[in-house]
Amino acid sequence: MRYLLVLLPLCWLVGAQNDVVDVMNNLGLRTTVQLLGVANLIPVLQARESCTVFAPTDEAFSNLPTDLKQQLLSSKMFLIEVLLFHVSPNTTMSTDWKNNQLVMTLLETISIRINKYPSTVAMTADGGVISNPDNKASNGVVHVIDQVLYPLPFDTIANEVGMVGQLYELSKVIEKTGFGKILSDDGPLTFFAPTDDAFQKLPNATLQNLLKNVTALEDVLSYHVVRGGVYYKAGLSNGEELTTLQTGTLECHVNRTSGSEPQVKINNAKIVGLVVPALNGAVHMIDTILFPPK
């Protein structure tokens, strides 16, 4: 018994030496640790008394678009900015989170939005699925996520849309109708945003008639907005219906295959490209304009 009492505190001390960087190494998150090293952020994390790291898997980094990977490797300031967004100055366990909770990050001015979805039993951080939460460390906790958190949510949906090249036509329509006021409110909002290709699908006569009728435009735009929740792909279940600002409903068609990104359609519109997080919600780009039922 005397030897057992001596060993117990020794075991506790050994465990206590595993800081968040050690835990990430033990979890096999090599790319995250390597990039933290390139950014000279490992000493920063090790020196912290408390922190939470949302750590992407190696596969999450390998799945990034080639141009984004090159930007991360070529611009140290950009790399630091992205990595700091993955770290909270406080220790937060998944059991303490509520749906739509905002978790402060080391970037200070922007936060990570946590979502909990009962229909799919998924938890997300800015849309990234938290696949392995609550890995405790001596100075915090590591939550493993399945994607790199990017783009960063610097602005409201109204302004984020204006910065996406594929949404140029939509930006003009929003400006024409003054719909930006709605997309700038506190939310939370989910906006299914038709791309320029979606506008080009419309017959020219239909598009021109729509552009002449501001009331009809507002009605169509309102049918693309869900208020009261932020719905990322991981939180959508097949057959689920979402009530829009226009009061109509959108039906979700979700095809999940193990090991691959879910394929999601909203009514007949396919979600395409990267989701764009915003301060007041999220933007999903879709390949077809949605029209409310008459």
Image (cartoon, rainbow, N blue to C red):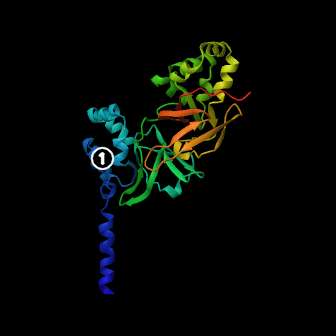
Q: Residues within 10 Å of mark 1 (few under 14, many from 20)?
A: some
Helix, strand or loop for disc 1: helix
Q: Position of residue 94 (x, y in %)?
A: 49, 55
Q: Residue furthest bottom?
A: 1
The quarter of the displayed image where residue 264 is located: top right
Query: Does residue 4 appear to the left or right of 112 in the view shown?
Result: left
90 above or below 190? Answer: below
Q: Is residue 173 left or right of residue 36?
A: right
Which residue is drawn at the image coordinates 61% and 31% (left, top)? 185
Can residue 163 be seen by looking at this rendering? no
How many numbered tags mark residues here?
1
Across and down, in percent, residue 157 comes to: 54, 30
Q: Nearer the viewer, residue 194 or 288?
A: 288
Q: State the quadrant of the C terminus.
A: top right
* Percent position of residue 42, x then y: 28, 48
Residue 131, position as x, y percentages in the image:
45, 53
The residue at 50%/28% (across/down) is: 160
Quadrant of the rendering where the N terminus is positioned? bottom left
Task: Looking at this view, name the residue that lies furthest to the right.
Answer: 294
The reply to whether residue 203 is visible in this rendering is yes
The answer to which of 274 and 288 lies nearer the viewer is 288
Q: What is the three-letter code of the residue carrying label 1?
A: Thr
For mark 1, what is the residue?
31
Tell me if residue 159 comes above or below residue 103 in the rendering.
above
